[in-house]
Image (spheres, rainbow, N blue to C red):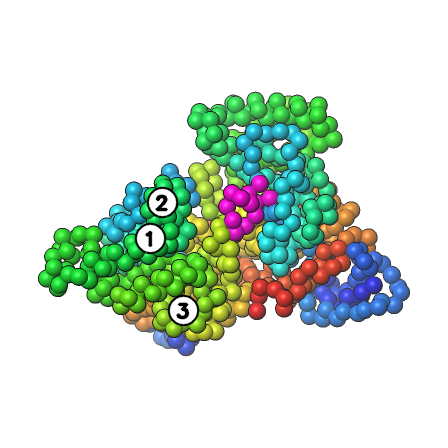
Amino acid sequence: MIIYHHATFLTVNEHNDIFEQLWVEDGRIVYVGPSKEIPPHAQLIDLQGAYVTPGLIDIHAHVGTWAEVTEDINDANEYSEPFTPLMHALDSVDIRHFSFQHALEGGVTTVQTGPGSANVIGGIWSILKTAGPTLASRVLVERSGLKGALGENPKNVFGNQYKRKPMTRMAIAQLLRDGFQRASQLNEQEQAEQVYQNSELRPFIEVLRGEMPLRLHCHRADDIMTAIRIAKEFNVTLHLEHCTEGYLIVDAVKNSGFHATLGPYMLTPSKYETRHSTPAIAAIFKEHSIPFAIMTDHPFVPIQYLKYCATEAIRYGLDEQTALKSITLNAAKLVQLDHRIGSLEQGKDADFVVWSHPIFETEAKVLQTYVNGEKYFEAEGAHWKTQKLPL
Amino acid sequence: MTRYINGLVFNSETRSFNKQSFQVQGKYFVQTTITAENEVNLDGYFITPGLIDSCSQIGLAEIGIRWEGDDSYEFDSHLQYSVVDGIYPFDVAFQKSVSHGVTASHIVPSPKSLIGAKTAIIHHTHTTVDEMVIAKDMAYSFSIGHQAKSTFFAEKKKPLTRMGIAKILRDTLQQIQQQEPSIHKIVVRAHKAVDIELIHRLQQEFNNAFDFHIIHGTEIPLVEETAFHTVIAGPTFRYIEHNEMMALSPKLYSQLSTLTIPFVFCTDHPVSSTSHLTLEGCLAVREGMARSDVLYALTTGAANFLGISHKTGAIHDGLYADFVIWDKHPLNLDAQVIATFIKGKKVYAMEEGMSK
């Protein structure tokens, strides 16, 4: 057993408790709380007055599949067809990719990653730890959602560039409905057959059965509403990805009962559809009690800057506790993994980050990042020093 | 005349915040003992000079739109190109910018432009570019390495080598000497050490007739030579777009400090966003820079580098009254701008803004 002490442990549990000791055994947290007597066999680690948070979680990123924003090395968008339900994140992810190292440098220990937003139906997402010797050892959820996209991206790639369907939002909606219509016409035995064969209807059947959500990329208000309308037609769970103009139709979003991952609002609006993007959306959703997480959408905002996406929401009116939860516990809840990750609590995975200062302070630097109790990142020259500007 | 009292005002000489008052008459800061018509109490607030972005495409590459609003890149170059002819004063990015305390930018064409244009420094307000310009024909902009090569390949379907780039630069520099003899500054976008070394060679070949300033400078720490004119470093809060940027990290700021290479900050908006200029500063602080030095580089240091310190960049009598009122230290990550003034006029106030 390893006992970490002499640090401020921000648990991010329901009560936002702050404690003095963290005990880790076999990759799990076995105790977090006030200082208590150390058992004789334990190894004691002095964190020298640092600040510890749970490992950060980004539930919308393309880590390992789409590192640089250039099409030569894009393994996130399968441009061959607008309808590619058989694409699977795990077939694209390269665990040796530098984006995993960047994630650890930024204190990110869990990511949901997978296909991008060029296709109306893009494929299956997965949830991974950012460290571990093999892909299999990193997988938390192999099939965590069916990703699709509305609006400008499919219109631009297929209609505008390839001169083929979908050119309009009408065709996008029709393509989105298509898989669900075909799947819902099958009886139980026929559905089981499709799942067994891993046919292109399998993901739709899994979504219809509630085994994973539908995850739809939508920026513009009308696209958000189309996504909600289609989800209600087939009585499936929808998770809104981006939801950029959601604050313009906040009551409709709230009434839908669906949740959202917000961002990447730190990006300069590069297209018409994102021109109303604002970090204020997080505070507005909080005010209306709509559950949300905050994304980097790596590589668009690099994964190591997840913390700064939460800080920007604070600058635009969100309280610090909710901001921190939106990249830890609340993100874990939105992907039903809060029994394992998202806070420092007994029984959870020992994923945690050691910071030089309180996390939202300018000076705060990641000193160490732990995944499943293993230290996978340590800053060079962990001691903080001031330098002079030669100007 | 308005007197602003009791605020914590950034003093560019001491690089510290001191409680002091200052006066604004018309467009300028003024020294006076006359009774002010208005008195504004800034007790509890931090006041800085307006922040200056040392490399930005604001107004040149409009946000929220694609090619229709993008005037940052022309494949066929011409020495008469000037960014002044491409700036759209109603780019909504200007509003966003002043709401984050940035009052002026050095406008540089896109990294796609091997030979770019004459750059200019502009204020972030006004309805015509002529009123916005603080200084024009400040420098010529070049962009070398991967971006220039890949742009050339996209246009010509054949490669451009680093040898070819060097020849184009030499020819262009000779043309500048003949056609635009008053321009001596060249700003060069470069990431890789090998490209930065080419610029050092050109500096010598032309007998220091030009001052070359590197923009980005990702691999400067790998270069043996440490005699640099002021570098426009970063931005570091941005995606890694190609292999030449693999080493990009905010560590660059502390590395440049260690090498005693002078530098200023930029966002290269819309690559990062004009609203993230203080974030670059915050990342430098995280890497060990003193807050006071970073604030200096974001204001007076940038004005000195851009040659506009006789007009703006400090809260000093006789200069344009470009200043920002903050609710806390501007390099706190959650600092908010209460109000921004350009040439004495309020161009942003929080209650009218996008924030709550």
- Residue B296 located left or right of residue B115: right
Pointer 2 or 3: first along the chain: 2
Q: Secondary structure at mark 1?
A: helix
Asked if labels 3 and 1 touch by Cβ distance under 8 angstroms, the answer is no
**Which residue lies at the image location 68% right of the left edge and 30% below the top edge?**
B210
Height in image: B148 above or below A140? above
Front of the two marks 1 and 3: 1
Pointer 1 or 3: first along the chain: 1
Q: Amino acid at mark 1?
A: Ala
Label 1: which residue?
A171
Residue A1 on the magenta segment: no
Q: Nearer the viewer, residue B156 or A167?
A: A167
Label 2: which residue?
A158
- Residue A285 image offset from top left, x and y in percent: 45, 69
Q: Are marks 1 and 2 on the same chain?
A: yes
Question: Label 3: chain?
Answer: A
Q: Amino acid at mark 3?
A: Val
Q: Amino acid at mark 2?
A: Phe
Question: Label 2: chain?
Answer: A
- Residue A6 located left or right of residue B206: left
Q: Nearer the viewer, residue B28 or B41?
A: B28
Magenta-colored span: B60-71
- Residue A209 located left or right of residue A162: left
**Which residue lies at the image location 32% right of the left edge and 72% below the top edge?**
A346
Residue lying farthest left? A189
